[in-house]
């Protein structure tokens, strides 16, 4: 795979040796990456929280909507990735058929009317952020692997399967990392 520079629509994949507990075996969807730094959302850290418990209006939706942990920065902020820009106005279209954010009122209306399909939305608390040059330094240091995101990575692959799924898709030598033990001392 050619060398990639951080950009919206890419995935950051934590190699198994990454020592930061916030990002162990994480897959991060990059929403922004420019001279001001980078912003992304961790896709594979589920929580026990449901959207209806956090926001008014979502209790009228006919199914529970889970929330994931999007990163360690500002864990009290709610973010959404979706593939329903026609239902939710004001979002930012990103590569690969993913939209980030949108107006809360149109989001609530889409769910309250049951027009929204929960499978087209991923809600996340917090985010991952990097200062200018920080992410590039971490990539150069081997802390992250990069690959283009696919909509199915965000919306269809179960969070607990995402890390292995993306590494397998990347092919050798990255696909071998799925067999690396969580604690190599126990191998």
Image (spheres, rainbow, N blue to C red):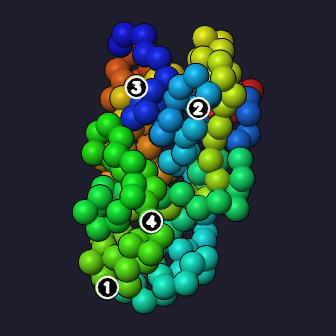
Quadrant holding the C terminus? top right
Question: Disc 3 and disc 1: Cα gap in Å?
Answer: 36 Å
**Above or below: residue 100 compared with residue 138:** below
Looking at the picture, how far across and down is residue 8, in whole percent? 43, 33
Which numbered disc covers residue 103? 4
Residue assigned mark 2: 38
Disc 4, SS:
loop
Taking the spot 32% from the left edge, 37% from the top edge, the residue there is: 95
In front of the other: label 2 or label 3?
2
Q: Are marks 2 and 1 in contact (CB under 8 Å)?
A: no
Q: Earlier in the sequence, mark 2 or mark 3?
A: 2
How far, Cα to Cα, is label 2 from label 3?
A: 16 Å
CA neighbours of label 2 inside 10 A, class few (<14), some (14 to 19), many (20+): many
Asked if the residue at tag 4 contacts the one at tag 3, i.e. Cβ–Cβ closer than 8 Å, the answer is: no
Question: Mark 2–mark 4 contact, CB under 8 Å?
Answer: no
The mark closer to the camera, 3 or 4, is 4
Q: Please tell me which of labels 2 and 1 falls first in the chain.
A: 2
Q: Earlier in the sequence, mark 1 or mark 4?
A: 4
Q: Circle 1 sits on which residue? A: 113
Mark 4 burial class by Cα count in 10 Å: few <14, some 14-19, many 20+ = few
Residue 77 place in picture, x, y as percent:
65, 60
Which circle marks residue 147 in the picture?
3
N-terminal label among 2 and 4: 2
- Mark 2 lies on a secondary structure that is strand
């Amino acid at each position: 795979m050619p060398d990639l520079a951080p950009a919206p629509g890419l995935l950051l994949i934590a190699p198994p040796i990454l020592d930061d507990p916030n990002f162990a075996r994480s897959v991060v969807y990059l929403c922004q990456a420019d001279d001001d730094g980078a912003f992304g959302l961790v896709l594979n850290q589920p929580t026990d929280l449901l959207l209806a418990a956090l926001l008014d209006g979502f209790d009228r939706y006919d199914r529970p909507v889970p929330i994931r942990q999007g990163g360690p920065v500002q864990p009290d902020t709610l973010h959404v990735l979706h593939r329903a820009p026609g239902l939710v106005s004001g979002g930012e279209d990103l590569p690969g058929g993913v939209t980030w954010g949108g107006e809360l009122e149109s989001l609530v209306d889409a769910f309250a009317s049951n027009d929204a399909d929960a499978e087209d939305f991923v809600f996340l608390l917090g985010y991952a952020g990097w200062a200018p040059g920080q992410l590039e330094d971490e990539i150069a240091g081997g802390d992250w692997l990069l690959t283009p995101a696919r909509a199915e990575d965000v919306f269809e692959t179960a969070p607990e399967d995402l890390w292995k799924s993306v590494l397998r898709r990347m092919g050798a030598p990255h696909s071998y990392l799925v067999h690396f033990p969580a604690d190599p001392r126990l191998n």
